[in-house]
Image (cartoon, rainbow, N blue to C red):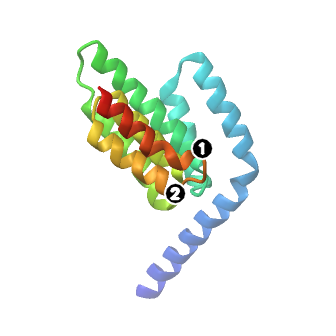
Amino acid sequence: MRKYIYTGGGIFIFFLFFLKFFLQPFVPLLWLKVDEAFHRGDYKKAEEYLGAIIWLQPKNPSPYILKGWLEWSRAKYLQSIGCPYEEILKKAEKTYKIGEKRIPGNWQLYFEEGIMWEAFGMKEKSLKAYYLASKYAKPPYNRIYYYKKKKFEKE
């Protein structure tokens, strides 16, 4: 019985890897679908397509950045009209954190997270993200933390 379970599990895992490899040529088509959905205003569909791209290309920072931005932008809109937004903001944070975990040292992910926290007035979280962005970025982007800290001190 165990032999069948292990064999079935192995076949399933092999199928997932094969499917992932087979679908790589369709990633540009998925990006087109993201663009179409975005321009139609169907942001949830765009997020779904971005989720598929993330699954196919987990080391590409672009889909994490765009998906996170779509999520926190929706949260910001809900906040502006007085609706609950915290759950969607947590979803955006999770998107960025997954990207940061899968692509360690990518300064753009931390920078985008900093922009998100700054938009919601969370200066400490924002500065922490900007610090990490500066730590991993090359000049001139490695000065982000310095400029943002100065800006926050003036406010």
User: What residue sits 43% from the left and 53% below the top?
Assistant: 132
Q: Does the residue at mark 2 contact the one at mark 1 (Cβ under 8 Å)?
A: no
Residue 136 disc label = 2
State the residue at coordinates (29%, 36%): 123
Q: Residues within 10 Å of mark 2 (few under 14, many from 20)?
A: some
Q: Is residue 90 visible?
A: yes
- Crowd band around label 1 with a 10 angstrom C-alpha radius: few (<14), some (14–19), many (20+): some
How far separated are the C-alphas under marks 2 and 1?
17 Å
Q: Is residue 52 visible?
A: no
Report the residue that reaches farthest toward the top.
Answer: 81
Residue at image coords 47%, 40% = 112
Which quarter of the figure has residue 79? top left
Name the quarter where the C terminus is drawn: top left
Q: What residue lies at 53% left-to-right and 59% top-to-bottom? A: 103
Q: Amino acid type of disc 2?
A: Tyr
Residue 124 picture quarter? top left
The mark lying in front, picked from 2 and 1, is 2
Question: Which element type, helix, strand or loop, lies under badge 1?
Answer: helix
Residue linked to disc 1: 62
